[in-house]
Image: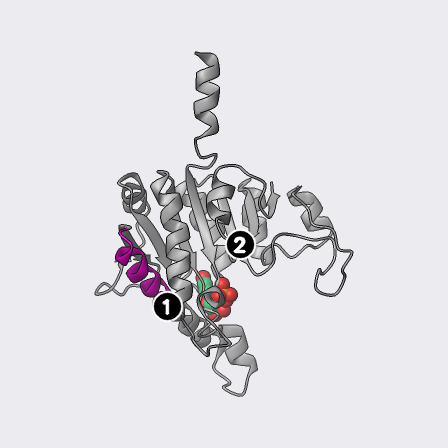
Amino acid sequence: MAEETTANSKNQPKYKRIVLKLSGEALGDRTAGDTISGEILQRIALEIKKVHDLGVQICLVVGGGNIFRGKLGAASSQKVDRTTGDFMGMMATMINGLALMDCLEKNGVPVRVQSALHIEEVAEPFILRRAIRHLEKGRVVIFVAGTGNPYFSTDTTAALRASEIGADVIMKATKVDGIYDADPVKNSGAKKFDQITFIDALKNQYAVMDSTAFSLCLDNEMPIIVFDMNESDSIRRAVMGETIGTLVC
Ligand code: UDP
């Protein structure tokens, strides 16, 4: 009986409630000139569906960098005031969130979008208990408009929402397949870590997240898995506890 329990638990997801952080750029296809690529959306939706079918409760936090970033707007010739630019960036995350919602729904995944800025016609306001209820009912919840405050990032949003909803882990999808001791593009001998501690990441200044987001995870002991979204099946495998990317804990 004990053996049976062990065997069964091996087939169970290690993480039951996750926050998946997708950057805005992960939705676009620069070569094709698409700010949001239908093909990429569909690929992401299918990866999420696989994990949803396992009964995992999924929150998505989506960035807006494919459309607008407040900091860059202020620095560029556009000269948009930083605070205004940040609100433009938050609105960009809404656009991406709606695109993800649409694609997930077309693949049969129930979704609710909750926004930190009020835009009732298209998204519910962020209400923690309602978000948890959606998760319990098997709905994917997409958090848009970041934290609702300028001078923050969507990585910080992921850290904040993950702590609020009591997620088991944040899965941060990036272009690289984990954290290295040197830049793998410039240094072919760079070594990838399967796992590192928060303190080691901090001491060695490994770029996991921006410092506000990172310290929120550190303070709340929220594990982060940094992984490559382009690697097929990576979310499912990570959720099942396989070594994917780098686990920071
Ligand atoms: N943003 C903000 N407050 C937040 C989250 C985001 O002001 O709480 C703005 C900020 O301008 C940011 C932009 O929204 O640059 C898009 O978010 P982010 O840069 O995190 O997107 P990503 O890099 O993940 O695509």
Q: Is residue 125 above or below residue 218?
A: below
Amino acid on which disc 2 is placed: Glu
The quarter in which the C terminus is drawn is top right
Amino acid on which disc 1 is placed: Gly
The quarter in which the N terminus is drawn is top left
Alpha-carbon neighbours of circle 2 within 10 Å: few (<14), some, or many (≥20)?
few
Tell me the CA gap for discs 1 and 2: 18 Å
Q: Residue at x 51, y 48 (%)?
A: 234
Q: Is residue 75 above or below residue 229?
A: below
Q: Position of residue 91 (x, y in %)?
A: 37, 70
Tell me the magenta residue range.
94-108
Q: Is residue 193 left or right of residue 5?
A: right
Q: Which mark is residue 231?
A: 2
Asked if labels 2 and 1 touch by Cβ distance under 8 angstroms, the answer is no
Q: Residue at x 43, y 31 (%)?
A: 12
Majority SS type along the magenta span: helix
Q: Earlier in the sequence, mark 1 or mark 2?
A: 1
Q: Residue at x 35, y 55 (%)?
A: 142
Q: Is mark 2 within 8 Å of ligand 1?
A: no
Residue sitting nearer the eye, 189 or 21: 189
Q: Secondary structure at mark 2?
A: loop
Q: Which residue is mark 1?
A: 38
